[in-house]
Image (tube, grey):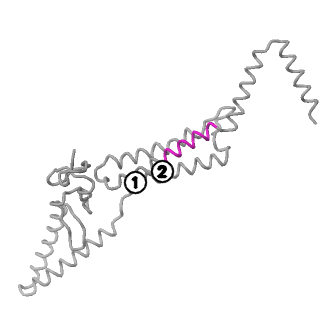
Amino acid sequence: MECHVCEVRSSVGFCAECQQLLCETCGVPCDTCGKISCPEHVHETRSGKRLCKSCYDERRGKREQRKAAAAAKLDKQDGAAVADEAEAEGDALDEALAESAPVPIQPWQMSLYIAIAGLIIVLLMLVFPGLRRIPLGGTNYLPTTLVVMIFPILSCVWAGLGLYKDEYFRDRSKCFIGIGLSAAGAALAILAMVTDPAATAQSELEKFQNERQDLNQQELTDWREKAKEQFRQQP
């Protein structure tokens, strides 16, 4: 459906106040809670922060409480000046608290970090073939690729979360970076499993043993004589 504001681009969310559909360009996320607002219902503070109506009302209510408390302690002549000073101090305190608050990690960042970790492990597998399998005892082993594939899967899950949630719509394009690296890591992991020298040698050994079982007694005798002849000819 089209955006209610520009009526050109497709909508990606809706205004938290009037519920009108908004596109990625016309929607304005709140700097405090992340909710999307249309241009008519977004409020901008003196410091440049853009807030939704609920966050703005909450901020204004706290400001009025500080002004009332300051005015109650002082006389009528000095009350207005002190209230303005309290308002300025409150704004500075709010800004300081907002800047010092820990910023939660975004889904596209988690997707990128996990994809990079998986890609590094796959590159190590390609450089060191011994890392391409996990011994399980005897001749049994587990291809490391099956374990490493967990990284691309987790990366795509986080990227999908960033693409699905409306509050992360401004960073949706960044989610495709993690998806691309995950696809590259998965392809290289499969390549490492297919080109594993140990797996190739084991496959050839099994093929050789199957061929020997299909030989009759005379063919087996001829094969042994041929193998002895080749061994004698070696320097």
- Residue under numbered circle 1: 174
SS for tag 1?
helix
Q: Is residue 191 magenta?
A: yes
Part of the protein shown in magenta: 181-194
Does 66 appear above or below 80? above
Residue that protrudes farthest toward the bottom in the picture: 77
Residue positioned 18% across, 60% down in the render: 39
Q: Which residue is mark 2?
A: 114
Q: Locate residue 228, reporting x and y percent.
A: 90, 25
Crowding near the residue tagged with mark 2, few <14, some 14–19, many ≥20 C-alpha atoms within 10 Å: many
Q: How many marks?
A: 2
Hey, what amino acid is under mark 1?
Lys
Residue found 33% across the figure and 66% down from its top: 101
Horizontal side of 97 relative to 196 (left or right) equals left
Q: Amino acid type of disc 2?
A: Ile
**Which picture quadrant has residue 215?**
top right
